[in-house]
Each structure stands twice: as structure tokens, then as C-alpha cells.
Amino acid sequence: MAVHRYLERYHPMEKRIHNFNAGPAALPKVVLEEMQASLLNYKGSGMSILEVSHRSRWFEEVLEDAKSRMKRLLNLDDRYHVLFVQGGASLQFCMVPMNLLPEAGLGDYVNTGIWSAAAIKEAKIQGKRVEVVASSEDRNFCYIPEKVPVHPHASYAHITSNNTIKGTQWPSFPDTGAVPLVADMSSDILSRHFDVAPFGLIYAGAQKNLGPAGVCVVILRSDMLERVPPGLPTMLKYTTYVEKNSMHNTPPCFAIYVVQLVCEWLEETVGGLDKVEALNREKARVLYELLDRGDFYRGTADRNSRSMMNVTFRLPTEELEKRFVAQAEQEGLGGLKGHRSVGGCRASLYNATGIEAVRDLVSFMENFAAKNG
Ligand SMILES: Cc1ncc(COP(=O)(O)O)c(C=O)c1O
């Protein structure tokens, strides 16, 4: 069978590269191995994890465990619900204003790049009243605004906690007083410790730090549910996901299963968010230190706004950038091309990327600069 020929040729678990993709992105090897083992016979069920019913006890356990681990990792109290929604972070751009921004209300948004702009656009499409209260567009989104003057009567203030494309990240979150924060944390959820109390809602497409594409994790504070207007389509209202435990219809079972494994790995192997944050800080420090050492590489984000997750940089010419990405790939360092909308280079250092991958990258970069500088 063709599948066997594929296995003979590629030995999937042997020749793995250092994966710096922005998403879908690297997953922990132990998670991939566990996943592989569950593909034929999941926990003695005699069925693949891909074959068990979403109403079976096997999947029920997966869902409950994924939720409890997420709650423990983020230190969520009983007011918070953990929901699993399809449609990616992009559907949340639409569901957030649809559910949380009343007709007469005002949504404050901070524009820190392409994904923030996409969130703003989706609110405006619905005819909602939206105001951009802070922006870094004046300098091509290379920084995080220091002041966020929210309107005290705003329904929420929306931010993008980490800007995957521009390589910036909020070093700490803005004080919005009584106005609930809403955050797109797609590219830095579970990468660092933070206080969840000011947040009414957090969403994150799983395919960067949480698991595979196909599920978006939504963390919702229960008081937000009071705003959900009547008459919304069933699959577009948060109340459905809360009332039906994210199982109104068939959920993305396999993606949720992998989120569960990643959370288990974070809790039990890595040792929680403080530990992973220390590792992430060290990985970013090592790479930025190299960028700052000479003038061959140039980081694109302001220093105090630099992302720990997506390190964006330029080389002296586009020609050199092309060569850099191609040669890196030949040496087993993949995914270093910048987003197609901005060009340049980008190394994504999500939780599953180890310090040894970053050290190998740095040593490749030193050699490349020595030969081409
Ligand atoms: C910060 C951020 N928000 C939203 C998205 C869009 O996510 P999705 O493809 O899950 O809709 C991305 C994708 O890369 C992202 O990085």
C-alpha cells in the first residue's frame, strides 16, 4: 500500500528538522509519539482516537482533562469557561463583537498589526461602533503603544497580545479599569504567566502554541454571557458552547485531544507556565543577542516591544534573505521565511521549540554572516 512505501522512504520520526514555522508549528516530540501510539488502539478501546465517538467515555475524558489542565495552567477560577470552537481565531474576530458588543455599545480596539486590523474589520462589517484607541501604524507596527486611553463606557477593549507577523508582543497588559479586556492570544497563549482577572474573553487558534489547526480555544468569563443577544445563530453564540459543553455538534475531536496532550506535557514534563516562561525568555534572549551583536542582521521590532515568540529580522538585501532561508533549510532549520505580507525573516520560538534548536540557529546565523557579511 502507498502509505507503507511512504513510511519506508521517509522514516517519519528519525529525520526531524528544527521547525521555526509560525503556525501550524512545532509540537513536542513526546506528544507526537503519544499521538502516533493512539492512532491504532486508544487506551485499549480497540479503536483509534480518530474513530471513537465524541459521545463516548473516552472522548468525554479527553475533553474534561483538556479543560481542567487549561484551567490549572492559567489559574482560572470558577467564573471562567474553557470552550472549543471551530473556525479559527478568524471566526472569533466576528463572534466577539456579535456576542459582546451591544447595538448601542462601543468597542475599543488597539491596532498593532494585520491581525488586529482583521478583528477591527469584522466588527465594522457588522455595523458595530468601533473606535481605534491606540495604534502603531505610524511606524509600520514595529512597537506596542504605551498609552491605551480606553473609553470608560466601552463594552470591551480588544488587543492582540502577540503580533505574529510584525514580531511584537505586549510586555504587560494595559490597565483598562472596569472595561473588560478581550485578547487574541493565538500566538502566545500558555507561553508566559499573566493575571487573567482583567480579561472578559481570550481566544487562541490552537495551531501555534496549543496543538494542531482545527480548533480555537476560547476562555470566557461568565458575566460576558449576559450580553449575548437573543436571535443569534446557534453555532455563533457563546451560550451554546457553554450550555452544551462545546458539544452541540461534533467537535474537532482530534485537535482537542492534541491540545490535551500539549497541556499535559506543559504541566507534567515542563512544569507549568513559570518554567516555560523562563525557557522562552532564554531562547529569545539568545537570538536577540545575536541580532544586536553586529549590523548584518537587523531586528524589525523596537526593543521594548520585542516578541519572545516570533523573532522578525532583516538581512542587508532581499537576495541574501532568500539565500539565508534556502541554506538554513538545507541544514535542517525550517520555516525561517517572513510572512508573505512583510518579507524578511522570522524565527518562531513557540513552547515546543527547544533551546538547542535556537543554539543551532544562532550558530548557523553566525557562520552565514561571517561568509556573507
Ligand atoms: C495573532 C493571530 N491572530 C489570528 C490569526 C488567524 O488565525 P486562524 O488562521 O486560526 O483564523 C493568526 C494566524 O496566524 C494570528 O497569528
Image (cartoon, rainbow, N blue to C red):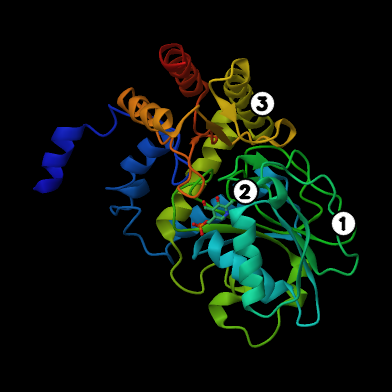
Q: Which mark is residue 149?
A: 1
Disc 2 crowd, CA 10 A, few/some/many (<14, 14-19, 20+): many
**Residue position for label 2:** 70
Frontmost of labels 1 and 3 is 1
Give whichever of 140, 346 is nearer the camera.
140
The CA span between labels 1 and 2 is 31 Å
Specify whether 202 is left or right of 14. right
Q: How many marks?
A: 3
Q: Percent from the top left, x then y, of residue 258? A: 45, 48
**Residue position for label 3:** 278
Kind of residue sitting beneath label 1:
Pro
- Whether residue 239 is visible here, answered yes or no, is no
Q: Answer yes or no: disc 3 within 8 Å of ligand 1.
A: no
Kind of residue sitting beneath label 3:
Ala
Q: Percent from the top left, x then y, of residue 344? A: 49, 37
Give whichever of 73, 90 is nearer the camera.
90
Give the residue drawn at x 36%, y 28%. 323
- Whether residue 188 is visible here, answered yes or no, is yes
Q: Residue furthest bottom?
A: 231
Quarter holding residue 123: bottom right
Q: Secondary structure at mark 2?
A: helix
Q: Percent from the top left, x then y, of residue 294? A: 59, 16
Which tag, 1 or 3, sits closer to the chain's start?
1
Kind of residue sitting beneath label 2:
Met
Disc 3 crowd, CA 10 A, few/some/many (<14, 14-19, 20+): few
Q: Secondary structure at mark 1?
A: loop
Q: Percent from the top left, x then y, of residue 306? A: 67, 34
Q: Are marks 1 and 2 in contact (CB under 8 Å)?
A: no
Give the residue drawn at x 42%, y 33%. 30
Give the residue drawn at x 42%, y 17%. 372
